[in-house]
Amino acid sequence: MSEFIIASLLIAFVTAASFALEPLTGYLSIALLYLLLVVALGLRMRRPTVLTVAAISALLWNFVFIPPRLTFYIDKVEDGMMFATFFVVAMAMGHLTTRLRRIELAERQRERRTAALYELAHQAAFASDLDTGLRAAVALIDSIFGAPAALHLRAKDHSLSSAPHAASTLALSPAEFREAAVVFGGPAVAEESKALSNVIHVVLQGRTARMGVLSIRPLPGRLFESVERELLEAFAVLIGLTLEKDHVVEALKRAEILETSDRLSRALLDSVSHELKTPLAAVQAGVDGLERQIGGDKPTATLAEMRAATRRLRRVIDNLLDMTRIEAGVIELKLDWSDVGDLVTEAISLAGDALATHDVKVEGAEGLPMVKLDQPLIEQALSNFLLNAAAWSGAGTKIVVRAWVREGRLSLSVLDEGPGLQNGDLRRVFDKFYRAPGARTGGTGLGLSIVEGFVRAHGGSVRAANRSTGGGEFTLDIPVETMRAELGEFA
Amino acid sequence: MSDKATALIVDDEAQIRRLARVVLEADGYRVLESESGEQGLADVALRRPDVVLLDLGLPKLDGVAVLKRLREWSRVPVLVLSVRDRPEDKVAALDAGADDYIQKPFESAELLARLRAVQRRVASDKDEPYFRASHLGIDFMAHTVTVKGKEVKLTATEYALLKILAQHAGKVVTHKQLLREVWGPNAEEQSQYLRVYMTYLRKKIEAPGAKEKLLRTESGIGYRLVLPAKE
C-alpha cells in the first residue's frame, strides 16, 4: 500500500515540475519526464504499481498537457500518435525494468540460499561432534528465518523421541509434538503440514531412514514464501544426512569393538588351551615311554590307571574349554551337508572305549535326506549323550540311538536302560555343573550343558524324558535344511 | 622304511621336543630339533630331514606361515602338531601344504603311524600298480577293486574317490581336495555330492559288521583311508 502512496506523491511531484518546465520545453518533452519516472519506479517497485503508474502518467499527460488542455480529447493526429507511442513505451519500460529487478532478486536469493546451505553443511558435517554441529545448525536457522527451532530425533525403537535435542531453541507444546510425530510417521513426500498451530514441521530425511523432525515457529504474521520453505527442506535433508552418517559411524565403531573383543577371547582361549594341553601331552608321552621301558605287552595296573586318568583329564579340559567357548559366544557355525548315518557312526567312535561294554544299536539313520549342520559340533553333542547314557546304565545293557528328519527338523535321541531321572531333574540335567543325585564320581556336570550349548547355537532345543519301559531318553532337535541328493546327477 | 630316517621336530616347548625325541628314537629315527619357525626353515634347508613334525602354535612365525614358506621350495613330508581343536585350523594347515595333522595330546603309537603314513606319499606317487589294505585290493592298471578277494563294481566316480584316498592312504584328504580332484575345480562347494558318494562307496567296500572302518570321517575336515596297524 505504501508503495502506491509514494508512487502517487512522485507522480504529483513530476506533474508539478512539468507545469514549471512546460512553458520552456513545450508539452512533448514532458512525456520524457513521465517515462523517467516509470523507469525509476520499475527498478524499485513491484510490477502492478509500476504498470499503474505508467497508465496514470499517460492519462495525466494527455489530460493536463496535450492540447486542448484539461480534456482527454486529442486534437491533432500527431498528438494522438505521440500519446499511443507514450502509452506503449511506458508499459514496455515498466514491464522490462520490473523483470530485470525480479531476476536480480531471484539471483540474490539463490546466492543467499547457497551460502546458507554451504554454511550449514560446513558446520554440521565438520563439527567435532554431533551436538556442536546441531547447535550450529539451529543457530543458522534462527539467523536466516528469524525463528526458534526444535529438533526431535529418532529414538532407539525408531519412533520419534519426545524429548527435544539439547540444541533446540524452541519447546513444543504436547499438541505441537503430536503434530511433529504425525509428520514423522506420515507419507514419504513432505506435504504442506496442515497444522492447526502455526509451527512448521519438516522431516529430517536421511538416505535410507528418517532421522527426526525439525520444527520451527515463525514470528507472528510472518509468512513463509515457497523459496524459504524449500530452503528449510534442504536444511532438513542436510541435517538428516548428517545424523544418518553419524549413526552409521557409531554402528561401525560398535561392530569393531565387538569384533575386537571376540578376537581377544578367541586368542585367550587358544592360549589357555595351549597351556593346559601341552603338559598333558607331556604326561601322555611320558606314560607311553614308561610303558615301553617296562616292556612286555601287559601294561601294569599302575600304568593303566595313569592312562585312564590322563584320558579323563583330557576330557575334563576339553569340556571346560568347550563350555567357555559357548559362554563367550565365540562359537561360529560352519554349516555343511552331512550324512546322518555317518554322523552317528562318528559320534559313537568319538565316545570310544566308554561304550565298549554296552550294546549300541542305531535306528533310522539310514536313508535320511542329507542335512545341513555343523557336523563336528553335533557329533560331539551326540557323543556326550552317549557318554552320559553309558555312565548311567550298567554293563551289557542296550543303548539305542534313534534318528529322524521331519518337517525340516533333525532329531537325535539316545535311549538307555539305566535308572532314568527324577521328575525334578528332567530340566535341571542340562544346567551347568548340575549333577543328579547318585552320579558317578569323575564327571564334571558339563557334558549335557555342552550339548545344549551346541544345539542352541543351531537354533535347536534339547529335552530329557523317562522311557515308559524305564531308563532315560535324551533328545536333541535342530532345524535343518534338507536335501535328497540324486545319484548320477553329477557323476 | 630305512632305520636312518631323519625327523625334524619344530616346537617351542622343550618338554614336547624331549618327549617326541624319546618316542621317535625308540622307533629308530635320527632326531633333530628346532625351537622356532625361522630356525626350522633353515634346518630343513641345511640338514634335509626326511620328515618334519611342525607345531602350529609357534611364537612369531606361526606354523601355517612356516608351511607356506616351506612349500615354496620343499616337498618334505610335514606332520602338523596342534593343540587347537577347531577343524578350520587343521584345514588351514592342510591347505597350506601339511600332509597330515595330529592333535596334542597324542598317543605315541598314533604319532608313529601318522609319521609312517606321511612318508608313504613318496612311495605311492611312483605309480605302484597295486594297493592293498586289510580286505581291500585295488588294481590301478585294470581299474578293478576287490573286497576279500571278490571283485566289486564301482561307478567311475566311486572309483575315482577311492583311488585318491588309497593314494593318500593313512593320511587325511580334505573335502576340498576330493571335490577338486574328482569333480573339478568348480565343484569345491558341492559337498553334498561327496557325502552321497562316500555313503555309497562305504556300502560297497566296508566289511559288514567290522568294528574298525576302513574309510574314516574326519569331521569338518575330510576323509581318511585307515591303514591297518601292522601290515
Image (tube, rainbow, N blue to C red):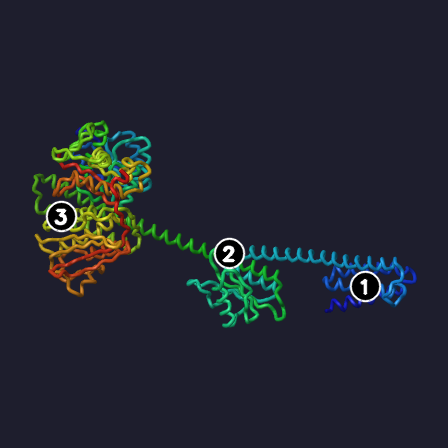
Cβ–Cβ below 8 Å for labels 1 and 3?
Answer: no
**What amino acid does circle 1 point to?**
Ser
Q: Where does the image place residue A18, in percent across and percent down from the top left? A: 87, 63
Q: Give the label on residue A340, or none.
A: none
Q: Where does the image place residue A363, in percent across and percent down from the top left? A: 16, 51
Query: Where's the N terminus of chain B, which quadrant?
Result: top left
Cβ–Cβ below 8 Å for labels 2 and 3?
Answer: no
Query: Where's the C terminus of chain B, which quadrant?
Result: top left
Earlier-in-chain disc, 1 versus 2 = 1
Q: In what element is the residue under mark 2?
A: helix
**What amino acid does circle 2 point to?**
Leu
Which sits in the foreground, A130 or A429? Answer: A429
Q: Give the label on residue A353, or none.
A: 3
Q: CA distance from mark 2 to mark 3?
A: 65 Å
Chain hosting mark 3: A
Residue A31 position by quadrant: bottom right
Seen in the image, is B187 located left or right of residue B3? right
Same chain for mark 2 and mark 3? The answer is yes
Earlier-in-chain disc, 2 versus 3 = 2
**What amino acid does circle 3 point to?**
Asp
Kindly identify which residue carries mark 1. A57
Mark whose residue sits in front, 1 or 3: 1
Compared to residue A260, the image places residue B107 above or below, namely above
Earlier-in-chain disc, 1 versus 3 = 1
The residue carrying pointer 1 sits among few (fewer than 14), some (14 to 19) or many (20 or more) residues within 10 Å by Cα, namely: many
Residue appearing at x 14%, y 37% in the figure:
B229
Same chain for mark 1 and mark 3? The answer is yes
Residue appearing at x 23%, y 59% in the figure:
A432
Q: Is residue B217 visible?
A: yes
Residue appearing at x 11%, y 46% in the figure:
A303
